Image: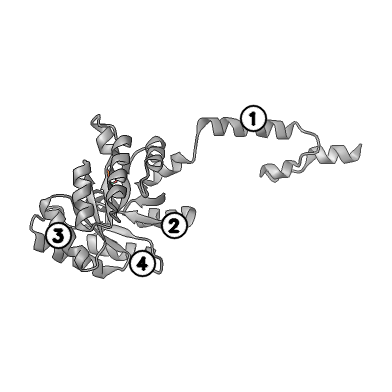
Amino acid sequence: MKLLLDSAKVDEIRYAIDAWDVDGVTTNPRHVRASGRPLRALLDEIAEAVGGTDKPVSVEVNPHLTDRAEIVRQGRELATISPNFVVKVGVSEVGCAAIRELAGHGIRVNATLIFSVAQAWHAARAGAAYISPFLGWKEQFGDPAAAFLGEVRAMLDQHGYQAEIIAAAVRNAAQMGDAAVAGAHCVTAGIDVYKDSFKHPFTTMGEGIFQNAWDETPGTNASSNGSGAPDTKAAVASAR
Ligand code: E4P
């Protein structure tokens, strides 16, 4: 499963590339607003951050657009900014028509705001390269999301659609695990969600237990605890 960063902050994108070799980035209008940067300048900065890689970056068209020709025009414009850019279009009847046209121009589209298998099917059938079911939003309103993801994956496989699922709006490690088990091709989450997902209280507790055992074992090297302190145990042992 590919790891995508859900953010439009360039410092976060650079961190994720360096620390995790992130597979790509997803943005949305909320992330763009949170970056505090003007849209075009931001897009150029993001394009530069991923330049020379094949990491896809989803960039959303104006969500006010309801006219197919307008969506296609803006999508084509976004795609010219960077070869990494994937055009993000909200799923709807007109959205799917625009997706079909953009795909016909060889532009990769991420169909966003997917909440049903039928919407996922329409988007995949229209030629979307990615489809983004929003797990966090579904679960926030009491809809089970893990089974839904599995159904979307089964639908794609059964009919041979090439679209990749991006498990989106992922809020915690449990949803991340669910996405992997259900067969999502990619997951996208914010930087703090990923940072938390490396951790577990038992891991922290276990590290303490093993560090104590290490320190109480004759012949262990105290400098290997990272403190840089002299190896007193070894010194005492060799003085005897
Ligand atoms: C996905 O591509 C979306 O950008 C994202 O996951 C939406 O979630 P949010 O509620 O975290 O903005």
* Of labels 3 and 4, the one closer to you: 3
Relative to 155, residue 81 above or below:
below
Is ligand 1 less than 8 Å from the beta carbon at label 3? no
Which residue is disc 2 drawn over? Answer: 17
| Residue for badge 3 | 98
Query: What is the number of the mark on residue 209?
Result: 1
At mark 3, the secondary structure is: helix
Q: Nearer the viewer, mark 2 or mark 3?
A: 3
Q: State if disc 2 and disc 4 touch (CB < 8 Å).
A: no
Callout 1–callout 2 Cβ contact below 8 Å: no
- Quarter-wise, where is residue 98 in the image? bottom left
The residue where tag 4 is placed is 48
How far apart marks 3 and 4 lie (CA) works out to: 27 Å
Residue 132 on image: x %, y %: 27, 48
Q: Considering only order in the chain, which callout, 3 or 2, is on the residue closer to the N terminus?
A: 2
- Tell me the kind of residue under disc 2: Ile
Identity, as a three-letter code, of the amino acid under mark 4: Glu
Left of 60 or right of it: where is 190? right
Check whether the beta carbons of the residues at disc 2 and disc 3 lie within 8 A of each other.
no
Q: 83 left or right of 77?
A: right
Tell me if mark 3 has few (under 14), some (14-19) or many (20+) residues whose alpha carbon lies within 10 angstroms of its own: many
Mark 1 or mark 2: which comes first in sequence? 2
Asked if the residue at tag 4 contacts the one at tag 1, i.e. Cβ–Cβ closer than 8 Å, the answer is no
Tell me the quarter of the image containing the C terminus: top right
Q: Residue at x 30, y 68 (%)?
A: 82
Per the model, the C-alpha gap separating discs 3 and 1 is: 57 Å
Quarter of the rendering containing residue 106: bottom left
Whether residue 9 appears in this view of the structure is: no
Name the secondary structure under disc 1. helix
